[in-house]
Image (spheres, rainbow, N blue to C red):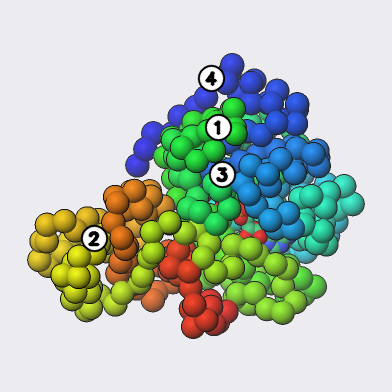
């Protein structure tokens, strides 16, 4: 895995000054790179939506330096939420809680809840403890596209619009945080991530999975999110070679992402063997999809991944990258 870089004092100071000036700063977290603004400055927060082309009412996550600030941003902290925060922060977990008075509508998209997270990446921690406030940040990509897991991904996609990009190397996890929402007495998993449903259950007991009618909106769960530009299809393992063969015979250039090497080597087919370990596969996923997207192929085929819990976050992102149809959506609801 990549080195964890620390930024220089001058770079950190420049980033802090930008935040105080109401400008945007891209920064690394252990999950993906974020595009940050002072969460207490609505005009700065609105800039995020402009730069990303993100619909204005999609809520953002507020990143905090530590658990101790939780009560400044959430007006209620249920017992279970506090236990999760104590157990998993700093780390790849986001809690959706009733928002405190001070939280602006620009951050929450007008909802009565706010998403909060304390990231563990050393550069994110340096930035947050220097800033001593909340930093609102979505992933640092254009709306609907793949999340960036390296500074160069951010530079490629947003470099013209974002002056300060802190380089913290390769993100350790590579997939966005697990999101857990507390609504009344209900606890729901809104987005799977590196912290699994089983781990959450061990701390809070009962856990619903997927959004229900009463759940807050999670735009990440709309179709065709986290998507490459090239059409992407998920294919059962046993059909992969035949699909590649048929498409190639029809003159289509095909790129493949699979947890294994090809059985037959074909010229002209870009094939990434992403391995059989879920954590490594997830860590590499967005980078691999970016590479295949750029390979000049007509189609990306992805071999179906296992149905086990360890692969839940990867399955979720692949389904969205494929622009999941109605069937995949109902699967997402039951988990
Ligand atoms: O790992 C991560 O969570 C990364 C890093 C940068 O922290 N951030 C991230 O942000 O993935 P974004 O905006 O790409 O995804 C945040 C998700 C969105 O799906 C958003 O709808 C959801 O969090 N969210 C934010 N506030 C919410 C709320 N009040 N209720 C429900 N969902 C919320
Ligand atoms: Mg995102």
Res 298 seen here: yes
- Mark 3 C-beta closer than 8 Å to ligand 1: yes
Of tags 2 and 4, the one toward the viewer is 2
Query: Residue furthest toward the front?
Result: 251
Judged from the image, the quadrant occupied by ligand 1 is: bottom right
Q: Which residue is mark 2?
A: 253
Q: Earlier along the polypeptide chain: callout 3 or callout 4?
A: 4
Measured from the top left, where is residue 63 in percent x and y? 67, 45
Look at 31% across and 74% down and name the residue there. 235
Measured from the top left, where is residue 86 in percent x and y? 66, 53
Q: Which residue is mark 4?
A: 8
Task: Give the number of the disc on residue 160.
Answer: 1
User: SS for tag 1?
Assistant: loop
Disc 3 and disc 4: Cα gap in Å?
21 Å
Q: State yes or no: discs 2 and 4 in contact (Cβ < 8 Å).
A: no
Disc 1 and disc 4: Cα gap in Å?
22 Å
Q: Earlier along the polypeptide chain: callout 1 or callout 2?
A: 1
Measured from the top left, where is residue 225 in percent x and y? 53, 62
Task: Give the number of the disc on residue 49.
Answer: none
User: SS for tag 3?
Assistant: loop
- Mark 1 C-beta closer than 8 Å to ligand 2: no
Q: Earlier along the polypeptide chain: callout 2 or callout 4?
A: 4
Q: Earlier along the polypeptide chain: callout 3 or callout 1?
A: 3
User: SS for tag 4?
Assistant: loop
Res 30 seen here: no
Disc 3 and disc 1: Cα gap in Å?
13 Å
Q: Which residue is mark 3?
A: 140
Look at 53% across and 33% down and name the residue there. 159
């Amino acid at each position: 895995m990549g080195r964890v870089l620390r930024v220089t004092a001058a770079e950190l100071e420049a980033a802090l000054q930008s935040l105080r000036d109401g400008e945007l700063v891209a920064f690394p977290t252990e999950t993906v790179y974020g595009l940050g603004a002072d969460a207490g400055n609505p005009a700065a927060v609105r800039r995020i939506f402009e730069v990303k082309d993100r619909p204005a009412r999609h809520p953002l996550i507020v990143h905090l330096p530590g658990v101790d600030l939780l009560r400044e941003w959430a007006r209620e902290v249920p017992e279970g939420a506090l236990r999760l925060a104590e157990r998993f922060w700093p780390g790849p977990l986001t809690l959706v809680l009733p928002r405190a008075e001070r939280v602006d509508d620009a951050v929450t998209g007008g909802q009565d809840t706010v998403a909060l997270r304390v990231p563990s990446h050393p550069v994110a921690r340096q930035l947050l403890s220097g800033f001593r406030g909340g930093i609102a940040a979505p992933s640092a990509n254009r709306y609907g596209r793949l999340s960036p897991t390296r500074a160069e991904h951010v530079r490629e996609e947003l470099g013209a619009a974002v002056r300060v990009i802190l380089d913290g190397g390769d993100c350790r996890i590579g997939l966005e945080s697990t999101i857990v929402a507390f609504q009344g007495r209900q606890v729901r998993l809104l987005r799977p991530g590196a912290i699994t449903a089983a781990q959450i259950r061990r701390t809070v007991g009962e856990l619903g999975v997927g959004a229900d009618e009463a759940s807050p909106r999670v735009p990440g769960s709309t179709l065709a999110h986290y998507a490459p530009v090239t059409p992407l299809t998920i294919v059962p393992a046993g059909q992969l070679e035949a699909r590649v063969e048929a498409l190639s015979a029809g003159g289509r250039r095909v790129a493949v992402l699979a947890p294994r090497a090809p059985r037959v080597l074909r010229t002209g087919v870009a094939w990434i063997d992403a391995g059989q370990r879920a954590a490594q596969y997830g860590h590499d996923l967005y980078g691999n999809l970016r590479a295949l997207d750029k390979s000049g192929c007509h189609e990306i085929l992805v071999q179906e991944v296992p149905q086990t819990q360890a692969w839940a976050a990867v399955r979720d992102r692949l389904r969205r990258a494929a622009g999941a149809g109605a069937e995949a959506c109902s699967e997402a609801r039951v988990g």
